[in-house]
Amino acid sequence: MSPTRWTWDPRSPRQALWERVRTIATDVGEPIVKLLEVPGAFVPGAPAALKSVRALFGSDLQISALDSGEVLMALDGAPGPFASADGSEPVFVEGVRIAVTLAHNGSGEAPVLLERLDLHLLEHRAGRQPEYEAAIDAEALFGAGLVEPLRFFVELDGPRVGRARRIVREADGSSRPLVAESPNFLDTDPAALLALGPKEPPQPMRITVSASSPGLYRFCLRWFYRVGARELRQHTSLPVAIYQGDA
């Protein structure tokens, strides 16, 4: 039986299912890039705590929601996305292209510094899943697209999350890859920390995630950022699902 194609419904946004942001610590001095692991992939709702925090600091990081066909796109030559077995989320074949935009919310003058971005693997079910099987168009072009600032590539191999690669452009017009030295996408030499002020333009970010081993993968993206060089916050994206058939 053929998989059911996923239909985006703008009238019923899925982001309400997950809390968008939480505060990890205040008055912290150690840079987040030195942390080996920050727990908490799923952020439970805490509206009262968040309300008190935002009363102290109006500034925050705005991140576009991963809940539309304009920000979650199939790889070139891949069909879908298809609906999951329970119909609750889209499932992308082989991989997914993510187009996200970061911006200062314009409330307050405190700058926002993005110090860490990582991919947290929520689930991996090895082997074939018949409900997601589909033919890949071998004749279609399969490319990464244009090289852009802050463009990342990540490969999932079973339970292992590969190190993110970022393409940087040299002064002479050539480009070269930088590989992160830890699960933090920004942990490269040179580093890719991002500072945003209330008058700074939005920063586009492009992330391509692909799977090399058969199975169903579910992951989320996590942004860790500091507000006013003082408060450390975490933003967790909606889950994203990928299915890889026989390799």
Image (cartoon, rainbow, N blue to C red):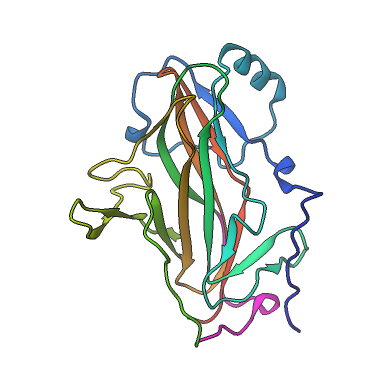
Instruction: Give above or below for 197 relative to 148.
Output: above
Q: Residue 159 placed where, x, y %?
A: 47, 61
Residue 96 appears in which quarter of the rendering? Answer: bottom right
Taking depth in this image into account, of 95 and 9 the one nearest to the observer is 9
Determine which quarter of the picture holds residue 169.
bottom left
Q: Residue, x 40% and y 53% (percent of image)?
A: 151
Segment tinted magenta in the rendering? 122-138
Which residue is drawn at the image coordinates 34% and 27% (left, top)? 31
Residue 44, position as x, y percentages in the image: 67, 34
Query: Up-down: is 226 above or below 125?
Result: above
Query: Which image quadrant: the N terminus?
Result: bottom right
Residue 158 in view, yes or no: no
Looking at the rendered structure, the number of numbered marks drawn on it comes to: 0
Q: Nearer the viewer, residue 84 or 200?
A: 200
Residue 236, position in %: x, y?
A: 57, 40
Taking the image as shown, residue 128 lies to the left or right of residue 199, namely right
Residue at the bottom extreme, as displayed: 139
Q: Residue furthest right?
A: 11
Q: Quadrant of residue 146?
A: bottom left
Q: Residue placed farthest to the top in the image?
A: 56
Residue 222 is one of the magenta-drawn residues: no
Q: Is residue 127 visible?
A: yes
Q: Position of residue 76 (x, y in %)?
A: 52, 73
6 vs 238: above or below: below
28 over 192 or under it: above or below = above
Which residue sits at x=65%, y=68%?
A: 81
